Image (cartoon, grey):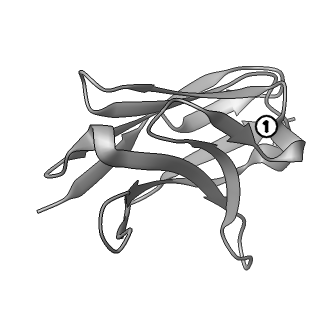
Amino acid sequence: QVQLVESGGGLVQAGGSLRLSCAVSGINFRLCGIDWYRQFPGKERELVAEINTGGEKQYAEPVKGRFFISRDNARSTAYLQMNSLKPEDTAVYYCNAVYRVGENNKYWGQGTQVTVSS
């Protein structure tokens, strides 16, 4: 059974930092692309950052230069380092693993709330 467990969310003041973690089990992590999404109330999930199996990274424009995605294959864990947080970053953040074999199945974590106070 594939499981993604996010942690590291919480309440932080504007300008502060948080690091989200996504621990993946039940699947070969090295063969997974990892994405971080966020969802604002009443909105669709939006892609924040992604890292492929080779370590290449991409970021959405609103977070470029502030958020940094990484992965530790030995720990089967992905991270999202979030710096210079703004109130508009307040959202539920989700980890998504895309298994790059066969049908590219996608797996989601339960989400973690990030709240940035002004």
Residue type for callout 1? Ser
* Residue 66 placement: quadrant: top right
**In the image: residue 47, left or right of residue 103:** right
Residue occupying image coordinates x 80% and y 47%:
60
**In the image: residue 80, left or right of residue 42:** left
Residue found farthest to the front: 102
Residue occupying image coordinates x 18% and y 51%:
27
Q: Which sits in the foreground, 30 or 23?
A: 30
Q: Secondary structure at mark 1?
A: strand
Q: How many marks?
A: 1
Residue occupying image coordinates x 34% and y 74%:
103
Residue 116 position in % (x across, y down): 74, 38
Q: Which sits in the foreground, 65 or 100?
A: 100
Residue 93 position in % (x across, y down): 57, 52
Quarter of the image with the C terminus is top right
Placement of 17 over or under 48, stated as above or below = above
Residue 62 position in % (x across, y down): 88, 44
Residue occupying image coordinates x 85% and y 36%:
86
Placement of 58 over or under 84, stated as above or below = below
**In the image: residue 105, left or right of residue 42:** left
Placement of 75 over or under 10, stated as above or below = above
Placement of 82 over or under 50, stated as above or below = above
* Residue 51 placement: quadrant: top right
Residue 71 position in % (x across, y down): 44, 27
On the image, numbered disc 1 is attached to which residue? 117
How many neighbours does mark 1 have within 10 angstroms: few (below 14), some (14-19), or many (20 or more)?
some
Quarter of the image with the N terminus is bottom left
**In the image: residue 90, left or right of residue 38:** right
